[in-house]
Amino acid sequence: MTTNVEVEKLALDLPEAERALLAARLLRSLPAILQEDDDGVAEALSRDSDFETNPSLGLSQEELNDQIERGRI
């Protein structure tokens, strides 16, 4: 039986175009993550309310940029 590690190694050895095609096929095989009638509006409003109640949950633009830069290094 082929393990996930073996499948991953084989997939990573494919040319880029074939990996992209495989990735697209695999993603299409999964159920949609967002299956809400309102396309996530209720979740966005809830998160906005949480942020209004507790602003420390958020990041400033500078903090966000710093975290992005640290992730690239």
Image: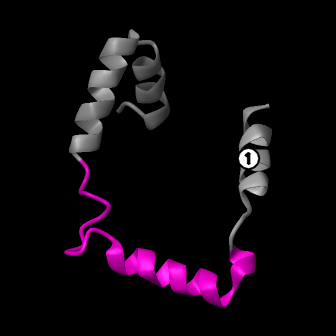
What residue lies at 22% left-to-right and 42% top-to-bottom?
28
Residue displayed at 33% across by 13% down: 17
Q: Is residue 33 magenta?
A: yes
Task: Say which quadrant the N terminus sits in.
Answer: top left
Locate the C terminus by quadrant: top right
Q: Could you tell whether 13 is left or right of 56 in the image?
A: left
Residue 53 versus residue 72: which sits nearer the camera? Answer: 53
Q: Which residue occupies the foreground of this view, 73 or 47?
A: 47
Helix, strand, or loop for circle 1? Answer: helix
Residue 38, image x, y percentages: 24, 74
Q: Magenta stretch? A: 30-57
Residue at point 45% right, 13% down?
A: 13
- Where residue 56 sits, quadrant-wise, is bottom right
Q: Residue at x 43, y 81 (%)?
A: 45
Quarter of image, res 10: top left
* Amino acid type shown at disc 1: Asn
Residue of label 1:
65
> Relative to 1, does residue 64 appear above or below in the rendering?
below
Q: Residue furthest top?
A: 15
Residue 2 to residue 48: above or below: above
Asked if 64 appears above or below 21 in the picture, the reply is below
Q: Does 6 appear above or below 40?
A: above
Q: Is residue 49 left or right of residue 65?
A: left
Q: Residues within 10 Å of mark 1 (few under 14, many from 20)?
A: few
